Image: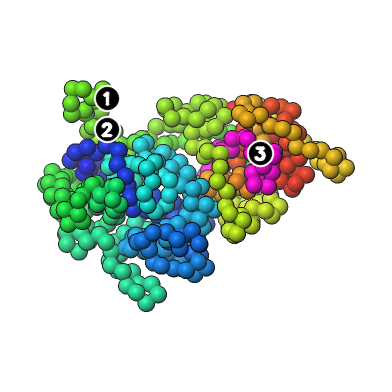
Amino acid sequence: MAIDANTGEILHNQGGDQEVFPASLTKMMTLYMTFELIELGRMNYASKIKMTPEGAARAPSKLNMKPGEELTVQEAIKALVTKSANDVATALAQHIGGTEANFARLMTAKAREIGMTRTTFRNASGLPDPDQTTTARDMLTLGLRLQDDFPRHYKLFNTRTFSFSGKTYRNHNTLLRTYEGTDGIKTGYTRASGFNLVSSVRRDGKHVVAAVFGGKTARARNATMQRVLSSALAKASRNKTRKPALVARAPQPKPVRQNQRVAEAPVRAPQPQPLPPPAPTAPAAAAPERPNKIAVARVRPVLMGNSTTAGSEAPPPEAPRFATAGATALPPAQHENYARAQQAFPRFVPETGALRPSTLQAQAAHLEAASGPALAPPQQPPPQQVAARMPSPRPSAPTGDFQIQIGAYANVAEAERRMNAARARAPDLLGSYTSFAMPVASGSSTLYRARFAGFDSAGATRTCSQLRSMQIDCFVTRGQ
């Protein structure tokens, strides 16, 4: 598939909605997540990434780093762009998400958020997994979003060579050197996927982005890509009518006053539409016709909080559309993130470097004013009662209307990490309950309420009291 990035028009489509394996094109989303955290101020190019045992054990292509060795975020980015290093992708994923499985869940959630409706990620590298699938249309959506959302970082996809530990690696994307106007972006290969490539070309005021999957060889794939690009460029427009997609993420964090509320009334938040599929090519196809335009610049409102999000993949009422699934995989005990999870929960988030939410009691008070009556946070029980109380057995599939909130954080990744840590510290209390991150506007920023859902009234109050006795701050509210 090829599109005119100036107008959004589809210029070529041959099976662009067929389910395929992304292989190392997966790293485009790994880098999208990395760029986003850099823009949020949680990392920078000089931040250190430590190679993990799991990363070092990954199959090639890799840098062959040993566990404990370090590289900077900028080096990690260039290693993914040029060498397509699987060991670095895993280490970066664990640095951000605690575990690679958790990071893959965040990748999938982000894919849905930016309009990639038919993509599922299971790892950060693209190594073979039968459940990790995508389409050419979704990868073009991602290719455009990388350019629209992160123009400064996108330039790194044009890196021709990368030197590390005395070795120099050439970019696998040879079109950077052989096809005029190519500025990126990524190659991919596994036996199951064949040779894949997403390319972006700017020439004579025209801008085309194309995806090719399933080449028998790298040379055959490149030849196909050049034919598609040349044909598309001949039809492309020099007039820029497509507007950059709205960035559906929290803006650069700003310092928050100690007494400033962090939970505001739910608002309507924009969600970019997926690229519309083309008209069916055979009479047997049942899909309705849609316009032959890529609509990454259009957005539709998504109802949050008291409203139900539209869409066939919407979660149950207690979990908003962008909620993350309840964690089932936790970091191994030897990981640094897991060690941090064993520490007492602070009420603030010093590691973000900027966002410092107010107390949960203040959040509860504001929720009562903004969204109707909420249960008051339980009082701290006497120590002798805490010592005598044992966790109550939980049903296997809780469906109550009440929820427990343990904090509000700058981004989904931080909320997910906090919920994972809470579940690890109190498995008997939280193990069977669904966790999710509810996005909510707070001034010019977006915060994510970290919540566990499915409690009845008495169970929520009792559980929150026990969590508070473990120094995990919380309050109880009714599901919206």
Residue at x-position 20% and y-position 49%:
215
Q: Nearer the viewer, residue 346 or 224?
A: 224
Helix, strand or loop at label 1? It is loop
From the image, tell me which residue sits under label 3. 430
Q: Residue at x 39, y 67 (%)?
A: 63
Q: Is residue 46 above or below residue 92?
A: below
Image: magenta residue range: 422-448
Q: Residue at x 26, y 22 (%)?
A: 286
From the viewer's side, name the closer residue of 189 and 178. 189
Q: Answer with the quarter of the image where residue 479 lies.
A: top right
**Residue at mark 2 to residue at mark 3: CA–CA distance:** 41 Å
The residue wearing badge 1 is 287
Horizontal and vertical percent position of residue 440: 55, 38
Q: Earlier in the sequence, mark 3 or mark 1?
A: 1
Q: Residues within 10 Å of mark 3 (few under 14, many from 20)?
A: many
Residue 208 image offset from top left, x and y in percent: 21, 48
Considering the image in quadrants, where does the N terminus appear? top left
Q: Quadrant of residue 430?
A: top right
The stretch drawn in magenta includes residue 254: no
321 left or right, relative to 200: right
Q: CA distance from mark 1 to mark 2?
A: 9 Å
Kind of residue at badge 1: Ala
Q: Is residue 197 left or right of residue 407?
A: left
> Whole-Å distance between the Cαs marked 3 and 1?
42 Å
Vertical order, 238 against 318 (above or below): below
